[in-house]
Image: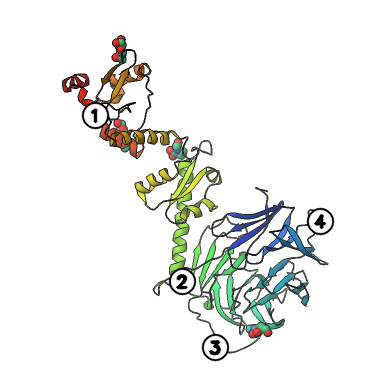
Amino acid sequence: MANQPILCASFNQDNSCFAIGTRGGFKIFDCNTGRLLYERAAGAFIIVEMLFSSSLLAIVGAGEQPSLSPRRLCLFNTVTGVALEELNFLTSILAVRMNKKRLIVILQEKTFIYDINSLKILDTIDTVPNPKGLCAFSPSLDGSFLALPASTTKGSLLVYNVSDLRLHCEIDAHRSPLAVLSLSSGGTHIATASEQGTMVRVHLVSDATKSYSFRRGSYPSNIFSLSFAPAEERPDILLATSSSGSVHVFSLGSPPNQRSSGLLGSIKVPHTVSDALDPAQHCILHRAVPAGVRSTTLIRKIEKFDETATPEHVVLRMEKRHNYVRKAAELASQFYINPATNQPNVTGLILAGSADFKTELSQSNMFDRRLKGKILKVVDVSNGGEDGFNQAIKLSAEKLGNVKFMQEIHIIGKYFEEISRDSGKYVLKNHSSGETMVKILSKEQDPETNAELEMLAIEYRKFGCSLEFVTNKSHEGCQFCRGFGGIGAILRYKLDVRDFDEEEVHEDSE
Ligand SMILES: *[C@@H]1O[C@H](CO)[C@@H](O)[C@H](O)[C@H]1NC(C)=O
Ligand SMILES: *[C@@H]1O[C@H](CO)[C@@H](O)[C@H](O)[C@H]1NC(C)=O
Ligand SMILES: *[C@@H]1O[C@H](CO)[C@@H](O)[C@H](O)[C@H]1NC(C)=O
Ligand SMILES: *[C@@H]1O[C@H](CO)[C@@H](O)[C@H](O)[C@H]1NC(C)=O
């Protein structure tokens, strides 16, 4: 199921994992590492929802196999590999949401709220036609809300408290019908966008008041996803992805439009542009994904930052990171893809770095797919520059075992080891005569035209030696050439150099 088209993708409630459904089955990945955690090849699925990191999955088939009807919800245990329960419906299931108490099933004109343990229906809500299964759900048990569209002609929504199963409020958010709605994890805020896609609005759920209005852009666009950064109390960052391929980051730093009125129920949205926040609170990561690709973005964790660091700094950092990864990806294509053949001209790549950039790069869709296939290893190095480069080579030694470069380093390493044991001289043994001779070749001699070298290259077999050529391209090789003139030998046995007359040695070297 490696290259199966993805039919659905969703994050779990605490953003630690994501699940995808494909034509061939479903898979679960770890958000931290991108590692595949679970995989089952069992047919085509259009809904795969996790319950936090538990073994429970809610899955719905795409209808491609008779046993995988889009009208049947299966609660599946990933540990036992067994379906715990199946719920059948009259029409196709369009969305499923869960928390530790509730299971919510969205159909075109009905929404069911179940107790997740007993699977007893607690409530059935008749909705306006909702063919896309639009909904928002906050999984927190302290503020467990469900939001559903309230109209097919304008952008209003109904918010239900799924703990006491009461209608909490109605919000008129946009003039056009809703395209996306998203609740913050604690259920305090709800973000919405209409089919127009130019404005993103945030309302406080507690009293249904609008607290932010952002202008995403002047031209209509399909907003694919809205997501709040996780936060204990109030979220301070909202992300939006759209068909333009950009990721918009909105800061909820200081709510300028927050009203103190305790007004409950429906409110009217002012339709002026002036209520959009100043640009400092809106940053855009351009070309984050290819335009038109349906995408979802979320912030998994916000690092604690000191008081001077504002959400704008966070956004700026994200942007810098993003640009850095893009630059690295572009350079990799430029350096390692031969434009004439359109193919990589390297047999392998090692990605090294000190932070998680390398992992990000290896997973980024900006990084050329042809090069991704060439990645041999991703290593963690503590230094930058040449030191980091050499460290990366050492750490990848086992992957590079067959590469001549590594063999060279190994040979020179052995030589250096001998030197450090004080046994180094250029000594050759003449097998037929049993005579030992010592050659010292001076640094100044150019090895290319060196007669001694030529002699060695031709005669070495007669001495029972093996001959290896090395380059000065490695750090070790360079040291060998500079410090030892580029010719050395490893002896079979220790030789007392005092046996050799100084003059004779000199004569030989001339
Ligand atoms: C939702 O219902 C629960 C259970 O009755 C209640 O404790 C909670 O206060 C309600 N939330 C709101 C915002 O009304
Ligand atoms: C690979 O191709 C690129 C682009 O032509 C070139 O710059 C680079 O030197 C080549 N690398 C190798 C190892 O041949
Ligand atoms: C090795 O010894 C034999 C016999 O003395 C001699 O003929 C030959 O030239 C020697 N080889 C070298 C490379 O010195
Ligand atoms: C390697 O040797 C070549 C030829 O002698 C020289 O031009 C080059 O500078 C050397 N490289 C290093 C890193 O020493």
Number of residue marks: 4
Amino acid under disc 1 = Lys
- Residue 206 placement (x, y as % from top left): 61, 83
Q: Earlier in the sequence, mark 3 or mark 2?
A: 3
CA distance for labels 3 and 1: 84 Å
Mark 4 and ligand 1: say if the CB distance to the nearest ligand atom is below 8 Å: no
> Which residue bears the numbered disc 4?
67
The picture quadrant for ligand 3 comes to: top left
Q: Nearer the viewer, mark 3 or mark 1?
A: 1
Query: Which residue is nearer to you in this view: 335 or 380?
Result: 380
Q: Are marks 4 and 1 in contact (CB under 8 Å)?
A: no
Residue at the image position 31 percent from the left and 33 percent from the top: 418
CA distance for labels 3 and 2: 24 Å
Q: Nearer the viewer, mark 2 or mark 1?
A: 1
Amino acid under disc 2 = Pro
> Which residue bears the numbered disc 1?
443
SS for dot 4: loop
In screen coordinates, is 495 left or right of 312? left
CA distance for labels 4 and 1: 79 Å
CA distance for labels 4 and 3: 54 Å
Check the image and report above or below for 429 versus 374: above
In screen coordinates, is 90 left or right of 155? right
> Which residue bears the numbered disc 2?
311
CA distance for labels 2 and 1: 61 Å
